Image (cartoon, helix red, strand yellow):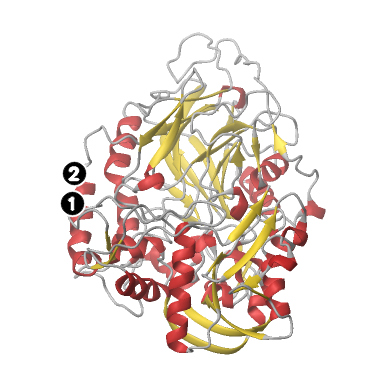
């Protein structure tokens, strides 16, 4: 099943189905200057302390991970509600490694520093510390809590992650696209509990499911037209009510295998949020937060970048800018995700009022602490009093003992499989770049495996979003530097896609390469990783399909013959036309092999050893002109 890419070139979905229905269109990059602080009515109690008037300004900020506390409770007119949020955990219970386990801090002098971050043992400690003294605290998530998970969670159908989220006291989350990797029935099992229908119970105890509701307002059963899970949920505390509406990106069917979304329809995010915002208002719930599994791209990769700083090129771009500009003013804040970016931005709603839009990167490296000032008299949020900041889940705090026990228990079950060595490398083999060394390695592995199924296999293509992590040289446990374990391979390719062979004409193959940069992928390129022997030029000074220079496409030094037939290895997601590669769904002569991780394992085992480790590929098959 496909992965959600974490970069602009591979994540932003064209909003083609929504364009004609929006009241306004996105203007590329949104930049919001400093907003003037407004004063609450005279005599209003701050944080329920029952004292004289206090001024709160709409504010966003960042810190070094120590946390910022909100109001402590009481029954004055104004009550601070602490909203803690995160997104795109993807089953990363243990601290993620390499670049996936770091965030970038921007210093005042313009220099940057990388900070190690993430791991639920530390996330639990940070969240619990942040909640101290806050009687009015709710924790929410923006989807993709599971799916594309490391072996400790993925091997057990993500039951360990649900257990960890229960211990984290997560109150509510939206679904993400990865919640549908194993289909809606499996998602329902994660919500409600029970043993896996095929693999049975993971332990001697029955899996009890999530203590928190998954919200799926825009995911409908095609037959009934009703949401497959709850569309919204209301948090209540001493008369304070905040409604949460959860949606995932409308384009989920384009990035999840067809089997995973069979029988489902995915509706427009804005239309759906606005519909349920009206319903909540009719029920007397006027304070509303939208949990949106769709995101954007800030102008800086630093988690503490000032998203609202004025100037050309600042702000946030991408689908969430479009969504935020059109979601009803009845919604007071948006918690977002999907793009794995970090931002805390104020984007005006359709009425021109400032509204907070946040995202906490991915893999549990950050959490967002937002203060929503609730007006007990109106039941609404005093929008000008909203404060928000992203905080680093640093690893310099004590580990939460209950999370350590959870990880140890599941690792004990996974160890016999996960600790097995499958290869050796001489250095980091990274997944980053338009063409990546790891992408080349995986494509070569699938080509070599494809030739065991059919010696006439000519080439292999791999979608970049299916590569979830880099292979790092440094040991992650006791295996030793340079040793690749099965668990590390599983983290790279966790979807259990099969390796499929299909026949295409040369003309079709050229069209496939052009689909990387045209049609649904024109606005956000999805550059396939190619096996050894296939070369071409990607000219980024041009637009659309012309970016792929047709005359430059060669296989083993020979131009592609448009009338010839080529045998191509891909994974089953691409073979079904996923990621906008419709031509790959038109192949003939299908042969279905074993899963892609098996292909990678066999390649590493056959082509590396402790005395002769595999060197990182050069990533020189695609010539890029900029």
In the depicted structure, whether residue 556 falls above or below residue 451:
above
Position of residue 365 measured from the top left corner of the image (x, y, whole percent): 39, 41
Residue 267 visible in image: no
432 sits left or right of 419 in the view: right
Give the total number of marks visible in the rendering. Answer: 2
In the depicted structure, whether residue 605 falls above or below residue 283:
below
Quarter assignment of residue 328? top right
Position of residue 408 measured from the top left corner of the image (x, y, whole percent): 18, 55
Q: Give the camera-side residue of 341 and 431.
A: 431
Neighbor class of circle 1 (other Cα within 10 Å; few <14, some 14-19, many 20+) is: few
Quarter assignment of residue 385? top right
**Residue of label 1:** 405
**Residue of label 2:** 401
Position of residue 452 measured from the top left corner of the image (x, y, whole percent): 42, 86
- Dot 1 and dot 2 residues touching (CB under 8 Å): yes
Residue 289 visible in image: yes
In the depicted structure, whether residue 366 falls above or below residue 155:
above
Q: Residue at x 37, y 34 (%)?
A: 115
């Amino acid at each position: 099943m496909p992965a959600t890419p974490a970069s602009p070139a591979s994540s932003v979905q064209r909003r083609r189905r929504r364009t004609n229905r929006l009241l306004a269109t996105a203007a590329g990059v949104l930049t919001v200057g400093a907003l003037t602080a407004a004063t609450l009515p005279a005599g209003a109690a701050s944080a329920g302390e029952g004292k004289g008037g206090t001024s709160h300004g709409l504010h966003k900020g960042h810190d070094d991970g120590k946390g910022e506390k909100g109001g402590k409770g009481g029954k004055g007119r104004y009550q601070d509600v602490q909203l803690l949020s995160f997104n795109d955990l993807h089953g990363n219970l243990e601290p993620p490694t390499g670049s996936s386990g770091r965030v970038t801090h921007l210093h005042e002098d313009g220099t940057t520093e990388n900070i190690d971050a993430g791991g639920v043992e530390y996330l639990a400690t940070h969240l619990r510390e942040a909640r101290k003294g806050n009687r009015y605290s709710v924790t929410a998530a923006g989807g993709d809590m599971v799916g594309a998970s490391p072996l400790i969670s993925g091997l057990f159908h993500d039951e360990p992650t649900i257990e960890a989220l229960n211990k984290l006291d997560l109150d509510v989350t939206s679904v993400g696209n990865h919640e549908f990797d194993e289909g809606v029935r499996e998602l329902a099992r994660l919500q409600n509990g029970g043993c896996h229908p095929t693999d049975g119970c993971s332990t001697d105890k029955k899996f009890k499911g999530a203590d928190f509701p998954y919200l799926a307002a825009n995911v409908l059963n095609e037959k009934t037209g009703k949401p497959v899970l709850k569309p919204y949920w209301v948090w209540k505390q001493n008369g304070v009510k905040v409604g949460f509406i959860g949606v995932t990106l409308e384009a989920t069917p384009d990035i999840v295998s067809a089997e995973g979304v069979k029988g489902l329809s995915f509706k427009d995010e804005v239309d759906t949020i606005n519909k349920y915002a009206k319903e909540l208002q009719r029920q007397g719930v006027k304070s509303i937060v939208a949990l949106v599994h769709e995101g954007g791209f800030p102008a800086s990769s630093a988690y503490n970048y000032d998203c609202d700083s004025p100037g050309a090129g600042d702000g946030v771009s991408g689908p969430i800018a479009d969504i935020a500009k059109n979601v009803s003013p009845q919604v007071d804040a948006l918690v977002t995700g999907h793009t794995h970016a970090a931002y805390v931005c104020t984007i005006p709603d359709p009425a021109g009022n400032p509204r907070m839009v946040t995202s906490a990167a991915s893999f549990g490296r950050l959490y967002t602490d937002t203060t929503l000032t609730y007006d007990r008299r109106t039941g609404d949020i005093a929008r000008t009093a909203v404060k928000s900041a992203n905080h680093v889940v640093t690893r310099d705090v004590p580990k939460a003992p209950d999370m350590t026990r959870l990880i140890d228990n599941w690792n004990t079950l996974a160890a016999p499989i996960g600790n097995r060595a499958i290869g050796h490398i001489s250095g980091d083999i990274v997944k980053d770049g338009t063409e990546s060394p790891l992408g080349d390695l995986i494509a070569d592995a699938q080509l070599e495996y494809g030739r065991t199924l059919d010696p006439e296999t000519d080439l292999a293509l791999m979608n970049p979003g299916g590569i979830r992590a880099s292979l790092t040289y440094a040991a992650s446990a006791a295996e030793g530097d340079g040793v690749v374990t099965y668990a590390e391979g599983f983290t790279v390719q966790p979807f259990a896609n099969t390796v499929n062979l299909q026949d295409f004409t040369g003309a079709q193959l050229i069209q496939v390469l052009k689909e990387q940069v045209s049609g649904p992928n024109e606005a956000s390129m999805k550059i396939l990783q190619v096996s050894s022997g296939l070369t071409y030029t990607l000219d980024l000074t041009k637009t659309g399909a012309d970016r792929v220079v047709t005359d430059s496409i060669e296989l083993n030094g020979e131009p592609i013959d448009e009338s010839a037939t080529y045998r191509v290895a891909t994974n089953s997601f691409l073979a079904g036309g996923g990621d906008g590669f419709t031509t790959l769904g038109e192949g003939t002569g299908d042969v279905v092999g074993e899963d892609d991780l098996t292909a990678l394992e066999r390649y590493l085992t056959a082509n590396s050893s402790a005395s002769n480790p595999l060197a990182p590929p050069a990533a020189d098959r695609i010539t890029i002109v900029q």
